Image (cartoon, helix red, strand yellow):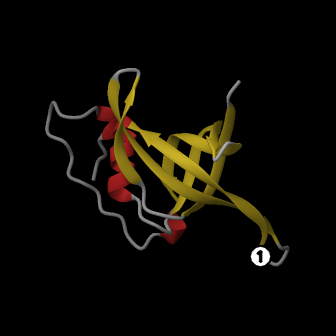
Amino acid sequence: MALRINGSGNLGSAPELRTVEVNGEDRKVASMRVFFDHTVPDGNGGFVDKGGCWLGVSAWDNRAEHVARVLRKGMRVRIEGTLQERLWEKDGEAMTSWDVNARNITLELARLESVTLRPKASAGQGTPAAQEDT
């Protein structure tokens, strides 16, 4: 059973894009660290920090390329995906970490100064769902 996660946080570093082999196939993956914060209303129109946690986040294939091109350290993002436990050994000691396999990554608009859209694809390029009217 997969554990779904839907949270907001700040990128601790720019995404790192690399190619990995998965089941004999080369695939792109963008890896990044995100601090998922936990804030609650303070009753006076503001918010109080109640802590949070760092998680590794991975985006795959076309999403990986887009993430690596657009996202930068410090950006506020919303991540939807699946939380996965990762086990490995270091110096003979069993280690555990939790990572998110991102299904969707969006920018939180409150922290943006501007947005620049790329030109629409020519007829026959891209998919209609990926194209936007300007």
Q: Nearer the viewer, residue 133 or 94?
A: 94
Does residue 92 sit above or below 32 in this rendering?
above
> Residue shown at 20%/52% (left/top)?
119
**View extreme (top): residue:** 23
Query: Residue beneath label 1, please?
Result: 45
Compared across the picture, whether 102 is left or right of 17 comes to: right
The answer to whether any part of residue 39 appears in the image is no
Compared across the picture, whether 115 is left or right of 35 comes to: left
Secondary structure of residue under mark 1:
loop
* Amino acid of disc 1: Gly
Please state the horizontal and vertical placement of residue 125, each as a whole percent of the image.
18, 34
Query: Quadrant of the rendered structure where residue 15 is?
Result: bottom left
**View extreme (bottom): residue:** 44
**View extreme (right): residue:** 43
Please state the horizontal and vertical placement of residue 42, each as a whole percent of the image.
83, 73
Please state the horizontal and vertical placement of residue 133, each as a whole percent of the image.
29, 48
> Residue shown at 69%/44% (left/top)?
95
Does residue 113 sit above or below 123 in this rendering?
below
Dot 1 surroundings within 10 Å: few (below 14), some, or many (20 or more)? few
Compared across the picture, whether 62 is left or right of 75 comes to: left
The answer to whether any part of residue 106 appears in the image is yes
> Residue shown at 50%/63% (left/top)?
109
Does residue 124 sit above or below 91 in this rendering?
above
